[in-house]
Image (cartoon, helix red, strand yellow):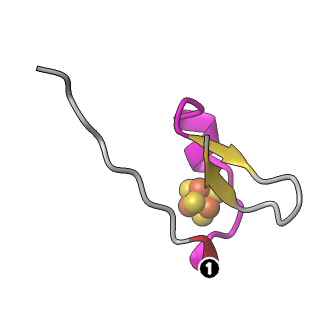
Amino acid sequence: MANKLKVNIDRDDCISCGTCWTTCPEFFEQNPEDTHSQIV
Ligand code: SF4
């Protein structure tokens, strides 16, 4: 059985620290326009 993950980002509270896209680049990336995190 395949494992499933549900990923959410509260973009209004994102401070663009980079922890999420540094540690899990398969799920997160930095939006080039507003610098906040987004789902890959
Ligand atoms: S860059 Fe990622 S870890 Fe950092 S505040 Fe934004 S969502 Fe959270």
- Report which residue position mark 1 lands on: 12
Q: Which residue appears at 54% of the width and 35% of the height?
A: 23
Q: Quadrant of the C terminus?
A: top right
Residue 14 percent across, percent down from the top left = 62, 70
Disc 1 residue lies near ligand 1 with CB under 8 A: no
Q: Quadrant of the N terminus?
A: top left
> Where does ligand 1 appear, by image quarter?
bottom right
Q: Magenta stretch: dominant SS?
A: loop
Name the residue at the top extreme: 1
Name the residue at the right extreme: 33
Name the residue at the bottom extreme: 12
Of residues 32 and 23, the one nearer the viewer is 32
Q: Which residues are magenta?
A: 13-27
Look at the picture and state if 24 lies above or below 16. Answer: above
In magenta stretch: residue 14: yes
Q: Which residue appears at 19% of the width and 22% of the height?
A: 2
The amino acid on which the numbered mark 1 sits, given as a three-letter code, is Asp
Q: Which image quadrant for residue 34? A: bottom right
Look at the picture and state if 12 lies above or below 35. Answer: below
In magenta stretch: residue 34: no
Q: Which image quadrant for residue 29? A: top right
Residue 22 percent across, percent down from the top left = 63, 37
Name the residue at the left extreme: 1
Residue 5 placement, left or right of 3:
right
Labels in figure, total: 1
Q: Which residue appears at 60% of the width and 32% of the height?
A: 25
Residue 9 percent across, percent down from the top left = 50, 63
For disc 1, the neighbor class at 10 Å (few under 14, some 14 to 19, many from 20) is few
Q: Secondary structure at mark 1?
A: helix
Residue 5 placement, left or right of 17:
left
Residue 32 percent across, percent down from the top left = 86, 52
